[in-house]
Amino acid sequence: MEEAVSAADANRSFSRVLHSVREGRSVVVTSHGKPIAKIVPISEHDDRTALGARAALLSRLRTEPVVDVGRWTRAELYKD
């Protein structure tokens, strides 16, 4: 089930919009009567996508060379 809400109303009552999404409803945000965005609940598919992205990132990091920058102090790290 979808609910339509204007951008102004969504801004004023964002916690209510998130509550609707948390309960499984989709919310279409409109501007001047035209749909501009859709807020939907996270699904299992999205979890698999996140895991795939994480695996791709870790794979890429494994191929990057290790750079030895030596040791530094906390003061040196935050020096302007």
Image (spheres, rainbow, N blue to C red):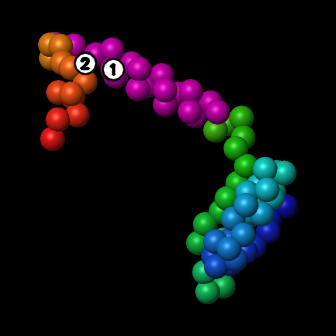
Question: What range of the chain is rendered magenta?
Answer: 47-68
| Picture coordinates of residue 3, whole percent (x, y) | 79, 68
Compared to 19, does 65 lie above or below?
above
| Picture coordinates of residue 44, whole percent (x, y) | 71, 35
Camera-side residue of 70 and 72: 72
| Picture coordinates of residue 26, whole percent (x, y) | 76, 59
Q: Residues within 10 Å of mark 1 (few under 14, many from 20)?
A: few
Q: Secondary structure at mark 2?
A: loop
Camera-side residue of 15 and 41: 15
Residue 20, quarter of the rendered image: bottom right
Amino acid beneath label 2: Glu
The reply to whether the magenta stretch includes residue 30 is no
Compared to 31, does 49 lie above or below?
above
* Image point (18%, 13%), residue name: 71
The reply to whether the magenta stretch includes residue 51 is yes
| Residue at mark 2 | 64
| Residue, far front | 75
* Image point (73%, 49%), residue name: 41
Residue 48, quarter of the rendered image: top right
